[in-house]
């Protein structure tokens, strides 16, 4: 009996320590976050507000809740079209890093612009020394599509593709304005907002390295049907993935470069159809090989060892009936990017399935909140 | 003192270092408390998500009994080993030329077989860890537990968030910031 009492007394500090570990604490702006901008960076940091950012120790891990607002200044000579920041708490376990990108910018030299960082990251509680989180510049895209930055996250490609989509969609809306006037632009905005509202919203889970939940017994190999995108420099030849109920895994797609230039990156859009005939975008299948090089006329494979699972509402499975694929993005060896044009998206009815581009999302949101005049004024800025 | 890199410590924690590097790291860890703490931390975070959702309730009586039993077992095991060491008769080592040649051959054979047969250490993908985009945002899931990785969008604007999935194991949440009007794209990675 006495031994038990002594043991309990000895374990009390352990319990107290565990309780302390579970406590939240605000981040110290001086020591918790390090913002690393290279000395020759085209953006400079004016202010960093950590706001409600918190760190919470839970067991052997620490959860870092970042709610930061950065003020950056364009210190270069060119207009900035987009920026990506890499945010790292640790690199070796899931949940340790994220990134924040701001595309569709139009920041003149000397102008100040905000970047918000709202992420939750994990790190070991006992990791020795240094700041809890490091924010680094991964890349800045200028309006002439030139790029600055270490590009660890392939920001150059992402930012360039977003900027090209932005240019494509602005051009489209300007054409509508020119040919059908403000009323025509208004109809186009309403149509886009309706598409965004009607787009099926599914819960998608992605896991790397094989099957997520289902058994191999019910699995079948399904072929991709391909949507022909006019003008695409790469054509898909054949492809398949393993389907089991509401799970699709290990997509493999063979593609041929039919352009005259070598290709170094291909991304296939992956559309699945449920038993009710509703189509939705499952995700994108990027080429997994970072050293992909596809000379003119040659074939190559786009594949990923991954599993996607689809549910809706409170977890009801969405059973996959058919799959389709289309070439969504191509990068040539000289860094130029190809994306489908607006007409091709309309003709293939992909416009109904795909998410709007970041720029279309921004412009429709501007229209929704500030009205038609503000939208017209915004289009005239470009 | 030269410390192993963070990557080496993380790989050591996941038992994914090559044989030689593992041996070197183990030797280093024997007398470097800092690196040992880092390895413990990596082991902890790899051990799974359940821990992240809070410190579990401890059954103190059961814990105390477990500790006492383990201590007793350790003491008894120590006694056994000491007893055996005392009782073992001294053996005369074999140092003849033939024996030395035989030992060298066996050692070479073992080394060659290890080099030939040892599978290359492969980076472990986050098997069992899933990224899921749902009405709550993007969550990291594993072992039936979940941890939200993205927040920051007001409840009223939740429907305006566009999630996109990269089959390489990443997820993007895109929304228009209601204060600034700028598009923000958050990316999280499953590995």
Image: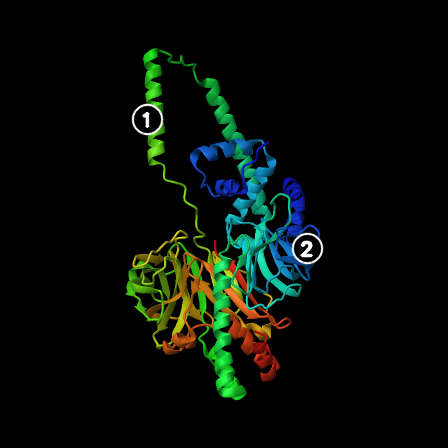
**Res A345 label:** none
Is residue B28 toward the left or the right of residue B167 in the image?
right
What is the quadrant of the N terminus of chain A in the image?
A: top right
Q: Position of residue A100 (x, y in %)?
A: 56, 61
Q: How many marks?
A: 2
Distance between mark 1 and mark 2 Cα atoms: 57 Å
Q: Is residue A97 depicted above or below A170 in this figure?
A: above
Q: Which residue is mark 1?
A: B109
Looking at the picture, does residue B64 appear above or below residue A196?
Answer: above
Depth check, front residue: B4 or B48 = B4
Give neighbour class at mark 2: few <14, some 14-19, many 20+ (Cα, 10 Å).
Answer: many
- The image quarter containing residue A11 is top right
Badge 1 element: helix
Way the structure is coloured: rainbow
Asked whether, in this view, residue B37 is left or right of residue B126, the answer is right
Disc 2 is placed on an element classified as loop
Residue B127 percent across, percent down from the top left: 43, 53
- Residue B16 lies left or right of residue A14; in this view the side is left
Q: Is any atom of residue A357 visible in this view?
A: no
- Residue at 34 percent of width and 56 percent of height: A294
Which chain letter matches label 1? B
Note whether A302 is above or below B84 in the view shown: below
Query: The C terminus of chain A appears in which quarter of the rendering?
Result: bottom right
Q: Are marks 1 and 2 in contact (CB under 8 Å)?
A: no
Question: What residue appears at the point 64 percent right and 65 percent down from the top-left corner?
Answer: A114
Q: Find residue B5 and report its horizontal and vertical position in percent.
A: 54, 39
Q: Nearer the viewer, residue A204 or A91?
A: A91
Provide the chain ID for the residue under circle 2: A
Residue name at image x 55 percent, y 58 percent: A99
Please tell me the numbered disc located at residue A27.
2
């Amino acid at each position: 009996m006495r031994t038990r009492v002594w043991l309990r007394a000895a374990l009390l500090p352990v319990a107290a320590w565990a309780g302390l570990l579970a406590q939240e604490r605000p981040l110290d702006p001086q020591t918790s976050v390090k913002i690393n901008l290279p000395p020759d960076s085209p953006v400079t940091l004016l202010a960093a507000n950590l706001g409600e950012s918190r760190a919470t120790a839970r067991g052997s891990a620490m959860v870092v809740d970042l709610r930061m607002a950065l003020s950056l200044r364009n210190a270069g000579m060119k207009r900035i079209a987009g920026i990506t920041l890499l945010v790292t708490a640790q690199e070796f376990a899931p949940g340790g890093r994220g990134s924040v990108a701001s595309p569709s910018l139009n920041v003149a030299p000397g102008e100040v612009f905000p970047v918000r960082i709202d992420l939750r990251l994990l790190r070991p509680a006992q990791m020795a020394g240094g700041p809890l989180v490091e924010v680094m510049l991964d890349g800045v895209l200028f309006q002439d599509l030139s790029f600055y930055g270490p590009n660890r996250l392939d920001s150059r490609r992402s930012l360039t593709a977003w900027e090209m989509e932005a240019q494509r969609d602005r051009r489209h809306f300007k054409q509508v304005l020119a040919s059908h006037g403000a009323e025509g632009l208004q109809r186009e905005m309403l149509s886009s907002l309706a598409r965004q509202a009607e787009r099926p919203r599914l819960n998608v889970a992605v896991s790397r390295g094989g099957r997520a939940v289902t058994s191999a017994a019910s699995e079948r190999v399904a072929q991709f049907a391909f949507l022909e995108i006019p003008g695409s420099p790469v054509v898909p030849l054949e492809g398949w993935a393993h389907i089991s109920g509401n799970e699709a895994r290990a997509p493999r797609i063979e593609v041929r470069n039919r352009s005259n230039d070598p290709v170094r990156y291909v991304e296939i859009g992956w559309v699945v159809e449920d038993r009710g005939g509703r189509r939705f975008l499952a995700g994108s299948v990027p080429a997994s090989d970072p050293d992909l090089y596809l000379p003119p006329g040659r074939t190559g494979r786009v594949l990923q060892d991954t599993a996607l699972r689809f549910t809706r509402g409170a977890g009801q499975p969405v059973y996959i009936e058919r799959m389709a694929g289309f070439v969504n993005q191509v990068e040539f060896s000289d860094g130029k990017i190809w994306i489908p044009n607006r007409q091709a998206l309309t003709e293939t009815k992909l416009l109904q399935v795909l998410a709007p581009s970041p720029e279309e999302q921004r412009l429709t949101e501007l229209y929704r909140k500030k009205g038609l005049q503000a939208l017209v004024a915004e289009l005239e800025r470009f | 003192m030269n410390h192993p890199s963070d990557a080496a410590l993380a790989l050591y924690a996941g038992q994914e270092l090559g044989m030689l590097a593992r041996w070197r790291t183990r030797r280093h860890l024997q007398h470097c408390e800092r690196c040992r703490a880092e390895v413990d931390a990596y082991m902890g975070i790899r051990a799974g998500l359940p821990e992240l959702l809070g410190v579990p309730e401890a059954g103190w009586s059961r814990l105390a009994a477990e500790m006492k039993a383990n201590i007793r077992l350790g003491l008894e095991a120590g006694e056994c080993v000491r007893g055996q060491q005392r009782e073992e008769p001294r053996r005369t080592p074999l140092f003849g030329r033939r024996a030395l040649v035989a030992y060298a051959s066996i050692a070479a054979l073992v080394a060659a077989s290890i080099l030939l047969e040892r599978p290359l250490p492969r980076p472990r993908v986050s098997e069992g860890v899933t990224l899921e985009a749902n009405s709550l945002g993007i969550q990291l899931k594993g072992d039936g537990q979940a941890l939200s990785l993205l927040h920051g969008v007001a409840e009223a604007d939740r429907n305006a968030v566009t999630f996109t999935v990269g089959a390489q194991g990443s997820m993007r949440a895109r929304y228009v910031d209601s204060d600034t009007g700028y598009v923000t794209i958050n990316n999280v990675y499953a590995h």
